[in-house]
Image (cartoon, rainbow, N blue to C red):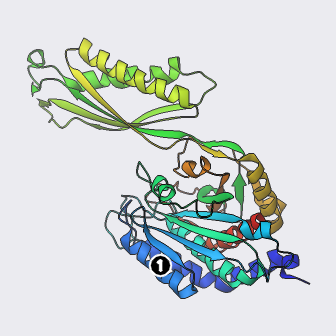
Amino acid sequence: MSISDHLPEHIRELTERYAGETVALRRHLHQYPELSFEEHETAAFICERLDELGIPYQSGVAGTGVIAELQGDADAAPGAGKAGAAKVVALRADIDALPIQEPAGLPFCSQRPGVMHACGHDIHSAALLGAGHILQTLRTQFAGTVRLLFQPAEERIPGGALGMIQAGALRNPSVSSVIGEHVNPDLPVGKVAFHSGFFMASVDDVYITVRGRGGHAAKPHQNIDPVIISAHLLSSLQQIVSRSADPLVPSVLSFGRVIADGAHNVIPNEVRIEGTFRTTDDTWRYEAHEQIRRIASSTATSMGGEADVEIRVGYPSVVNEPGLTERLRCAAVEYLGQDQVVDTPPAMWAEDFAYYGREAPACFYNLGVGTPGVDNAPVHSPSFQAEESCIALASGLLSYLALTELS
């Protein structure tokens, strides 16, 4: 009987065998995080591991990215044919961290002040290396190619996905599908979640500089107060979502940083405002950009000041290809069991994985990392933690999804 008849069991066996080293990989990555486009040591560590596994790779892609490739032995694979041998499935993990200070506590907490893997990219990378080990062990048992994409800079616009694509990550030969995962602390460890079609919003960074005329706070009549202008502006801009957006088109405009660098008795010359705009419709997306500019300018002008607006266009919406998503969902049920695979609604998060879906059929799913019965901290929080048993599960599932797609 061929290995294909017992593939889930065999992958689970390998996953268990390699679990300790996969967790160790994650802990190392967690201790030495690097920010977007600065992941030089992270990339070197990934390359060292690929060398140990005998997996060929290309480094320096899009700056600090790594592309590895596992070529199955078509002659050895049971029932293999030319069609299967020609298939290429890409598995993607992001490798960058966030500018967040991690509190002490974990024995493997970040050793780099102000930098932390608070979004689980260390888990994504370790799981992909674990999958590489499993697939390398099974390479004589499948036909086709599995391409491993270790992508830099997901956390910073313009992101690393575009650079990877421009460097040929999905070509020579072209991939038939791209698969990615993301940790979700709201989902208990052991479970994964899928959603077909629109899954995540587009994202654009909004920067507004409001200029007035500063001076002594005791003589506001001699000044043009950019703080008051900014207060009116922040309120007025919310009309874009509440009154201009179609109620059936999800939209979010949030401002998380307002810098009025005066003093308790000093009105500053200018105020800096920074925020994010997210939506699900590209036509409305760019209409909203124009409204942001118009409202900012008119509000400031009406109060004697002026406003400059910079909108950095970010990632498009993540759209999971329905056919691929349904196949992967079924494969996940085969590997994990029906109760461990759930549906998840779309969200206003954003991800540059979206770019892969514009080039090839793609699916991005959620990996449960939460501790059951606990109020788990969200990603991008200094308190974010993950149940480490998710890492072995993720590496095994990635392997199984890739091989079922190749078949």
Q: Work out which quarter of the rendered image holds the C terminus and state it.
A: bottom right
Residue 88 x %, y %: 67, 65
Name the residue nearer the viewer: 323 or 300. Answer: 323
Name the residue nearer the viewer: 55 or 261. Answer: 55
Residue 331 x %, y %: 80, 62
Residue 239 lies, with reference to residue 277, above or below; the image says above
Query: Which residue was labeled with disc 1?
Result: 47
Q: Quadrant of residue 328?
A: bottom right
Left/right placement of residue 68 relative to residue 190 reads left
What is the secondary structure assignment of the residue under circle 1? helix
The amino acid sitting under disc 1 is Cys
Name the residue nearer the viewer: 268 or 50. Answer: 50
Residue 40 x %, y %: 37, 71
Residue 238 x %, y %: 44, 24
Q: Work out which quarter of the rendered image holds the N terminus and state it.
A: bottom right
For the point 64% across and 25% down, the residue is 248
Q: Is residue 31 among the parts visible in the rendering?
A: no
Q: Is residue 257 among the parts visible in the rendering?
A: yes
For the point 26% across and 24% down, the residue is 307
Left/right placement of residue 225 relative to residue 346 reads left
Q: Quadrant of residue 292?
A: top left
State the residue lying farthest toward the right: 1
For the point 55% across and 79% down, the residue is 56
Q: Would you call the spot at circle 1 few (<14 residues within 10 Å), some (14-19), or many (20 or more)?
A: many
